[in-house]
Amino acid sequence: MEKKFIFRFIEINTLPRNCRLHKATEFAAIINLKYQVSGDLIQIYIKPNGLGYARLGLIVSKKIEQHAVKRNWIKRILRETFRRNRLNDPTNEIDWVIRLRRPVARIESIKLAAETRLLMHHLQQCHG
C-alpha cells in the first residue's frame, strides 16, 4: 500500500520582532505625545521614530475583553492590518500604539480592520 503525503504551503506573514514595541516606556512615550485619533472600536497614538521603519504596539486589556482567545484574535487582525498598511508605505518611520476601546463581536472583524486602516491613513496624512 502506497502512502500519499499532501503538503500544504501556507503563506505565513509575520511582523518582524524589530517592528514591535516591547517596553512600557516606549508605550508611555507614544501615548504621552498625544498625537491620537479615536474611532468607535479603537484609539490610535503615533510618534515619529527616525528608525527607517514603523513599529507597532497593541493594547487589548482584560477589562475590555476577558477571554484570551478573543484578545489574541483581535491582536491578529490589528497586526495584519498594520502589516498590510506598512507594505503600502515602506518609508513610514512612525511608532504606532493601537488601543481597543470596547469589546468587538465576531461579526465586527471587518469593521475593526476597516476602521484601523481609515484611522491610520488619517494620522499619516495629518502627522506623517
Image (spheres, rainbow, N blue to C red):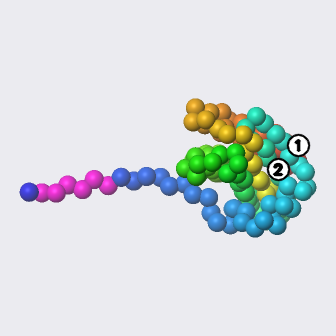
Considering only order in the chain, which callout, 1 or 2, is on the residue closer to the N terminus?
A: 2
- Give the residue number, with chain letter if any, for mark 1: 126
The answer, for residue 80, to whether it is visible in the render is no
Compare residues 74 and 102 and report the one nearer the observer.
102
Q: Residue furthest right?
A: 33
The residue that appears at 83% across and 52% down in the rendered structure is 46
* Quadrant in which the N terminus appears: bottom left
Determine the image quadrant of residue 22.
bottom right
Q: Position of residue 48 (x, y in %)?
A: 85, 58
- Give the residue number, with chain letter if any, for mark 2: 45
Side of 86 where 70 appears, left or right? left
Side of 106 where 24 appears, left or right? right
Task: Examine the rendered structure and indicate whether residue 71 appears above or below residue 48.
Answer: above
Q: Residues within 10 Å of mark 1 (few under 14, many from 20)?
A: few
| Residue 14 located within the stretch drawn in magenta | no
Which amino acid lies under the numbered mark 2 shown in the image of this protein? Tyr
The residue that appears at 65% across and 38% down in the rendered structure is 104
By secondary structure, the bulk of the magenta-drawn segment is best described as loop
Q: Position of residue 95 (x, y in %)?
A: 79, 57
The residue that appears at 16% across and 57% down in the rendered structure is 3
Q: Position of residue 110 (x, y in %)?
A: 61, 34
From the image, state whether disc 2 or disc 1 is nearer to you.
2
Q: Secondary structure at mark 1?
A: helix
Determine the image quadrant of residue 115.
top right
Q: Position of residue 35 (x, y in %)?
A: 89, 49
Q: Residues within 10 Å of mark 2 (few under 14, many from 20)?
A: many
The magenta-colored residue range is 2-7
Side of 55 where 38 appears, left or right? right
